[in-house]
Amino acid sequence: MRKLALTTVIGLFFGVFIFGEIYTDNNGPSAGVAGAPTDQTCARSGCHTGSLNTGTGTTSITSTVPSSGYVPGTTYTISFSVTETGRNKFGFQAMAAFDPIINKQIGNCIITNNTETRLRTNGNGQYVTHRSAGTAGTANAKSWSFDWVAPTQGTGNLVVYAAFNAANGNGSTSGDHIYTDTLHLNEEPLSVEEQAKLNFATVFPTIFDQNLNIQGTMSQGSEIEIVVSDLSGKQIYRMVDPVYTDSFSESISTSTWSSGIYLLQIQAGRRKQSFKVIKY
């Protein structure tokens, strides 16, 4: 738990939460106000005034994902809470979990309390938000939870985003305190055997003179990106191209490259491989 009045929120967070819906809309606020990078900001009518994360409240996001990381296909419980002295009406919306590679929600959210929470969706994925019956606090605090099924192997590290409203009960959009919070979920590291199954490309020869060749297999319609950098981090070569078959092949002319060691990275969809190659 952290005191948000002292926290600097980094990234594109949301500063909105529809107060009227806490009392009048049993369906909860529309999807897209959880504070994820793809979500809305306060620049629309009917939302709350005031600055984000400037109240004296505290928030918390916890999960049953172990410290070793989530296991694909496993179901975990994610819990959310908000506390503020003098407030007993609260709301929230959460995205679990945001994938920074595809800029969308991933995994499957399962509602475990249909009375107080519900599922909302938009083009960015699934959101969980409060219902009207899920806004009354006890002792200046409120909590919610739902289950989340972890996505497929190789997805990588994810982020849970949530926005909270500690309402003052004056019946308007002023005076409510809006907070945002995040929880990082790492994937359990793959074994050598598991990583080998995800490999999709080969590079040859790894010690080269005039040309460097790349071949691989991938899903139809996936975009492929190939980047070569020297050891200082300077980008020497970059190619981005959509692939509409289940295989790809690229030959890179290296005649103008200086002798030395280079780092080559290939990304196709969410799969990524890295190689160390040498120009002699």
Image: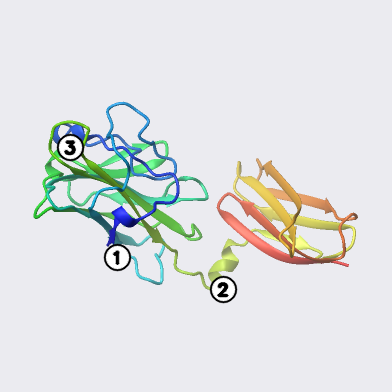
Nearest the camera: 132 or 12? 12
Distance between mark 3 and mark 2 Cα atoms: 49 Å
Which residue is labeled 2 in the image?
192
Quadrant hosting residue 69: bottom left
Q: Position of residue 154 (x, y in %)?
A: 51, 60
Disc nearer the start of the sequence (1/2): 1
Q: Nearer the viewer, mark 3 or mark 1?
A: 3
Q: What's the amino acid at mark 1?
A: Thr
Residue lying at 18% horizontally and 40% vertically, measured from the top left: 131
Q: CA distance from mark 1 to mark 2?
A: 26 Å
Q: Secondary structure at mark 1?
A: loop
Q: x, y (%) of residue 227? A: 71, 53
Say which mark, if any, is on residue 64. Answer: 1
Disc 2, SS: helix
Q: Earlier in the sequence, mark 3 or mark 1?
A: 3
Residue under the point 40% across and 39% down: 39
Q: Where is residue 33? Give x, y as percent.
A: 33, 39
Q: Amino acid at mark 3?
A: Ile
In which image quadrant can residue 167 be found?
top left
Mark 3 — residue? 22
Residue type for callout 2:
Val
Q: Quadrant of residue 262?
A: bottom right
Which class describes the residues within 10 Å of circle 2: few (<14), some (14-19), or many (20+)? few
